[in-house]
Image (cartoon, rainbow, N blue to C red):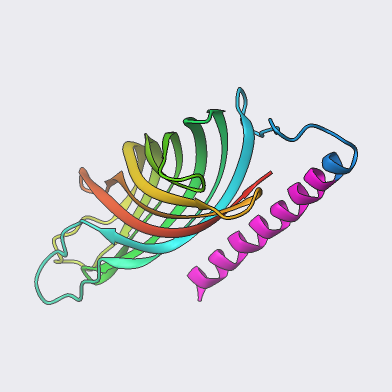
Amino acid sequence: MQMHTKYTRLAALLTITMMGTAATAQSASASGTDMSSRSSWLPYTNNGYIGLDVGRSSFQNSCGAAGFACDRSDRAARIYLGGTFNPHFSAEIAYADYGDMRRAGGSSRAQGLNLSLVGRAPLTQNIGLYGKLGTTYGHTRVSAAPGSGVAAGSESGWGPAYGLGISWQWSPNWSSALEWNRQRFDFSGNNSEWVRATYIGLRYHY
């Protein structure tokens, strides 16, 4: 229920933001403003966009001692803001929540703020491939039963991140994307592990 509430709030925030940026775009169009090179909320970029992705995460952490339930997958969600440098490169800032891995009589949670450089290559006029390379400032929280072999506690820090995806621009302002990515997080007990996610998402280009 708590996870569902968080995703609902993210979706509501993105919807409100999209409505506001859509109204701004319509106002600019009505006033005769040139929209061929649109504004962006990220410095030194133009043709900005915002997006919401939902999908599934996969933790790579060990399950701990035998006898405890272990489930490495959970729901994941991400909200992000981007802007382009040119038709082939852009930058994004995102907040991502990877949910919980159930293990060792407790859970391991990961979330973080990501900064990425995005490179794009068109396949057709409306479909293209893209790759991401960046870093995530992640925060993790681990709880575990005594004797499970898993250290409990919280950790924060920077880690590498990368991803691959395919996008479909189906209107001047809207596009969809399918993406796979990996982020490396620090966990308690001096453990550093990858968390993977597969997303499907919607973007609004304002």
Answer left or right for 22 relative to 181.
Answer: right
- Identify the residue shown where x is 20% and y is 43%: 190
User: For the view shown, which residue lies furthest in the left direction?
Assistant: 66
Asked whether 12 falls inside the magenta stretch, the response is yes
Q: Position of residue 144 (x, y in %)?
A: 25, 65
Answer left or right for 17 relative to 184.
Answer: right
Q: Position of residue 177 (x, y in %)?
A: 46, 54
Residue toward you, 189 or 123: 123
Magenta span: predominant SS is helix
Q: Residue 44 lies in what quarter of the image?
A: top right
Answer left or right for 69 relative to 180.
Answer: left
Q: Position of residue 126 (x, y in %)?
A: 51, 48
User: For the view shown, which residue lies furthest in the right direction?
Assistant: 31
Q: Where 175 sits versus 49, above or below? A: below
* Highlighted magenta segment, given as a residue range: 1-26
- Identify the residue shown where x is 72% and y is 57%: 16
Q: Position of residue 83 (x, y in %)?
A: 58, 34
Q: Where 76 sits versus 5, above or below? A: above
- Identify the residue shown where x is 31% and y is 58%: 142
Q: Residue 120 lies in what quarter of the image?
A: top left
Q: Where 162 sits versus 46, above or below? A: below
- Identify the residue shown where x is 34% and y is 46%: 164
Asked whether 109 falls inside the magenta stretch, the response is no
Quarter that holds the C terminus = top right
Residue toward you, 134 or 34: 34
Residue toward you, 38 or 52: 38
Residue toward you, 194 or 63: 194
